[in-house]
Amino acid sequence: MTFINSLFNFTKSSSSFKTILWSGLVAGILDSIAGILVYYLYFELNPLQVLQFIASGIYGPTAIDGGIFMIITGTFFHFLIAYTCAIIYFFLYPKIEFLSNHKTISGLIFGLGIWLVMNLLILPYTNIPKSPFDLGLASIGIIWHMILVGLPIAIITALYYNSKKVTSLIQHKN
């Protein structure tokens, strides 16, 4: 537990910007690792091709052969989405009591929500080539988004708000 505490020790003197920066970065990196592993196992794509595949949401199938520009574009959009999720959760956290009372469950539900929004509302309207529904791939994607995206965002956000609450209580008592 000391490793986890030291890893997230930044929250003691953190700003909201720093918290969002960390939660988006951690979620984005974990999501990247999961995506690279799963897309390698399912489709034999290498890490750079996974990033090009993300860019194909804007540029279509030609992004796969687009070189470094598409790799950078895919990386940009991947982290833009991760940071958007982190910002949304950060600003919802103090407004929805359930999030602070049930940190783990809310993080898992948020990850499920991310997967649902991306796969049902956003991706169908991009230039990513349509493919048949694969229950196994969908299940893996849901689980990885719950554990590796939603949960880290929830934990890092909760650490920030809890440290602010403790600081406020200490200042109030003095």
Image (tube, rainbow, N blue to C red):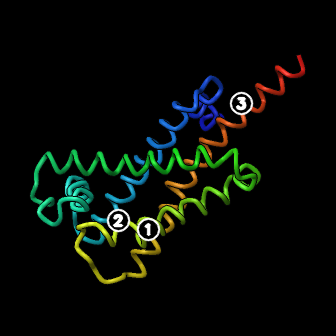
Counting residues from the start of the chain, the first of labels 1 and 2 encountered is 2
Give the x, y percent position of residue 55. 23, 56
| Residue with the mark numbered 1 | 141
Of helix, strand and loop, which one carries label 3? helix
**Structural crowding at the residue carrying mark 2, measured as other residues with C-alpha within 10 Å and reported as few (<14), some (14–19) or many (≥20):** some
Q: Is residue 129 above or below residue 13?
A: below
Q: Does the residue at mark 1 contact the one at mark 2 (Cβ under 8 Å)? A: yes
How far apart are the two marked residues, 3 and 2, measured between alpha carbons? 38 Å
Instruction: Please identify the residue farthest to the right as the structure is shown.
Output: 173
- The mark closer to the camera, 3 or 1, is 3
Of helix, strand and loop, which one carries label 2? helix
Give the x, y percent position of residue 156. 59, 41
What residue type is disc 1 on? Answer: Gly
What residue type is disc 3 on? Answer: Lys
Of helix, strand and loop, which one carries label 1? helix
Give the x, y percent position of residue 75. 28, 47
Counting residues from the start of the chain, the first of labels 3 and 1 encountered is 1
Give the x, y percent position of residue 147. 54, 58
**Structural crowding at the residue carrying mark 3, measured as other residues with C-alpha within 10 Å and reported as few (<14), some (14–19) or many (≥20):** some
- The image quadrant where one finds the N terminus is top right
Q: Disc count in the image?
A: 3
Q: Is residue 174 above or below residue 156?
A: above
How far apart are the two marked residues, 3 and 1, measured between alpha carbons? 33 Å
**Structural crowding at the residue carrying mark 1, measured as other residues with C-alpha within 10 Å and reported as few (<14), some (14–19) or many (≥20):** many
| Residue with the mark numbered 3 | 164
- Answer with left or right where residue 145 lies relative to residue 15: left
